[in-house]
Image: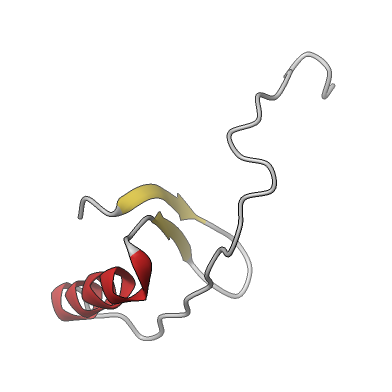
Amino acid sequence: MPEVVDFYRIGGDWDYLIKVITKGMSGYDAFYQKLITNFDLATVTGYFSMEAIISNRAVDLMRTR
């Protein structure tokens, strides 16, 4: 699905986290309809970003030790 830009298997209350980019809510709705039609999912929860505060920040791995 071309809207998917990141896809993670995570721990906690949910199993997976999918980051998608769409053009507005109608684009998200179209993606959501494809998602629930193509996959047998028990639960889908959506969160929406209103504004990017920090995006694609580089991490110095040597500093994090």
Q: Is residue 49 above or below residue 40?
A: above
Query: For this view, does 59 lie left or right of residue 33?
Result: right
Q: Is residue 18 above or below residue 65?
A: below
> Which residue is rendered at x = 37% and y = 55% of the image?
21
Query: For this view, does 65 lie left or right of residue 58?
Result: right
Residue 31: x %, y % from top left: 25, 69
| Quadrant, the C terminus | top right
Residue 23: x %, y % from top left: 32, 61
| Quadrant, the N terminus | bottom left
Quarter where residue 44 is shown: bottom left
> Which residue is rendered at x = 48% and y = 67% of the image?
15
> Which residue is rendered at x = 65% and y = 30% of the image?
57
Query: For this view, does 1 lie left or right of residue 54?
Result: left
Q: Is residue 6 above or below residue 12?
A: above
Residue 24: x %, y % from top left: 36, 68
In the image, 21 versus 18, the foreground residue is 21
Residue 39: x %, y % from top left: 20, 74
> Which residue is rendered at x = 15% and y = 80% of the image?
37
In the image, 37 versus 49, the foreground residue is 49
Q: Residue furthest top?
A: 62
Quarter where residue 50 is shown: bottom right
Colour mode of the rendering:
secondary structure
**Numbered label tally:** 0
